Amino acid sequence: MQVVIPDRDEDEEEHLRGNRKIALAFWRSNMDDWLVQVGGKPRQNQALRFRRLMRLTNLVLRGGERPNYLLFHELALPWRWFFLMSRKLSRHRISLISGVEYLRSPRRGVFVKNEAWCSLQSYVANFPNQVLIRVVKTKPAEDEEIGLAEQGLRLDVLTTAGTFRSGDVIVHGNGPESLFFSVVICSDLTDINIRARLRGKIDLLNVLAWNQD
């Protein structure tokens, strides 16, 4: 599947001319954060964590040359924080790509979804806008599957209306300045079918993973 997002109007030809600039967020997440997600327990340090996020965002905005894209790792942000950040970044024409914390699946109570969300800068009828792309992880990592099972949970890998699969092609831009990219979530990179499907079709592969490497 391929989706096309126009990213500029006719009066802004220079905005994305040349190389895109990408910032990688070094956002600390540990096993306690993962257990909070799957166990449903409230975080003790939520306010401190949010302040860290705002501090990091401000560092990006105060940096010398602002990026076109800011990337976070898999399962990095609560979905509400994602929307807060995307709105703030959009005022500076920065697109946000991040994993969001496990979402409860509408299928059944024991299922959760692991998604990456892309808030991409766009123009509709020459007015600035944001387009949200939701990318679904298609297979759990081995340790992830075991950890979820210990909590009585399973990963829902089915796409629903308005969501895309890990490895789908996203076209961000107009004409020759378009960027063809894809988002792959962690262990989905080991799927040879996904890699074969992307071969020769993209300029950039974003692999969002929660690993020490």
Image: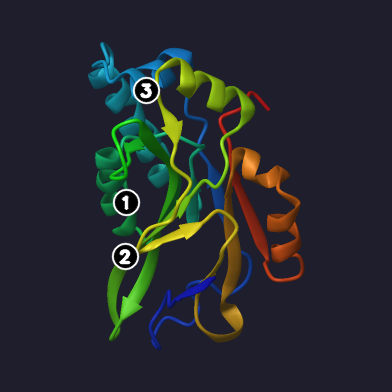
Tell me if I can see residue 68 in this picture: no
Q: SS for tag 2?
A: strand
Sequence-wise, the earlier of marks 3 and 2 is 3
Most foreground residue, 84 or 19? 84
Q: SS for tag 3?
A: helix
Q: In this view, does 106 lie to the left or right of 177?
A: left
Q: In this view, does 68 lie to the left or right of 163?
A: right
The residue pinned by badge 1 equals: 86
Most foreground residue, 10 or 161? 161
Three-letter code for the amino acid on which mark 3 is drawn: Val
The residue pinned by badge 2 equals: 130
On residue 38, the disc is: 3
Q: Nearer the viewer, mark 1 or mark 3?
A: 3
Sequence-wise, the earlier of marks 1 and 3 is 3
Residue 201 versus residue 157 in the image, above or below: below
Q: Residue at x 46, y 23 (%)?
A: 148
Q: Is residue 64 left or right of residue 182?
A: left
Q: Which residue is drawn at 29% across and 73% down?
A: 128
